[in-house]
Image: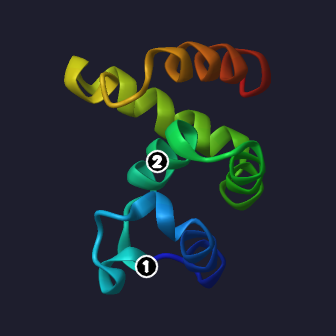
């Protein structure tokens, strides 16, 4: 179960999770949250994600996800993948 802060963040960005039923949204995984916000969120949403989870944790989730398989890596848009690979290499190491 996500913290109340994370649940509020999901509610604020509810439109990005349009395909998930309302009652399931508070339970989404951190992996899905990171993937969706990095791919589709605006810069304010990305900053808030970094604030809530921490840059190190987001970088860890991102790295784990893209290294899991080519299919999972393909869930990220090519430019997003490249951009956040560079961002995390600079700020999360």
Image quadrant containing the N terminus: bottom left
At x 67%, y 13%, the residue is 86
How many C-alpha atoms fall within 10 Å of the one at disc 2: few (<14), some, or many (≥20)? some
Which comes before the other along the chain, label 1 or label 2?
1
Tell me: 72 left or right of 11: left
At x 78%, y 51%, the residue is 44
Q: Is residue 47 above or below residue 52?
A: above
Residue 74, how many percent across, how many down? 30, 22
Residue on which disc 2 sits: 36
Residue 78: mark in rendering: none
Tell me: 51 left or right of 88: right
Image quadrant containing the C terminus: top right
Q: CA distance from mark 1 to mark 2?
A: 14 Å
Tell me: 32 left or right of 60: left
Residue on which disc 1 sits: 26
- Do the CB atoms of the residues marked 1 and 2 lie less than 8 Å apart? no
Residue 76, how many percent across, how many down? 41, 28
State which mark lies toward you, 1 or 2. 2
At x 50%, y 20%, the residue is 81
Residue 32, how many percent across, how many down? 39, 52
Q: How many tags in the picture?
A: 2
Q: Is residue 13 above or below residue 24?
A: above
Pick the residue in front: 73 or 79: 79
Pick the residue in front: 92 or 18: 18
User: Within the image, what quadrant is residue 52 found in?
Assistant: bottom right
Residue 50, how many percent across, how many down? 72, 49
Element on which disc 1 rests: helix
How many C-alpha atoms fall within 10 Å of the one at disc 1: few (<14), some, or many (≥20)? some
Q: Is residue 67 above or below residue 16?
A: above
User: Within the image, what quadrant is residue 84 found in?
Assistant: top right
At x 54%, y 16%, the residue is 79
Element on which disc 2 rests: helix
């Amino acid at each position: 179960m996500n913290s109340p802060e994370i649940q509020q963040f999901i509610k604020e960005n509810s439109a990005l999770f349009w395909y998930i039923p309302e009652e399931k949204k508070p339970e989404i995984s951190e992996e899905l949250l990171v993937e969706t916000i990095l791919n589709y969120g605006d810069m304010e949403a990305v900053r808030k994600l970094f604030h809530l989870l921490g840059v190190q944790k987001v970088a860890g989730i991102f790295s784990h996800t893209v290294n899991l398989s080519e299919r999972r890596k393909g869930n990220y848009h090519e430019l997003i993948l490249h951009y956040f690979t560079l961002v995390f290499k600079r700020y999360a190491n």
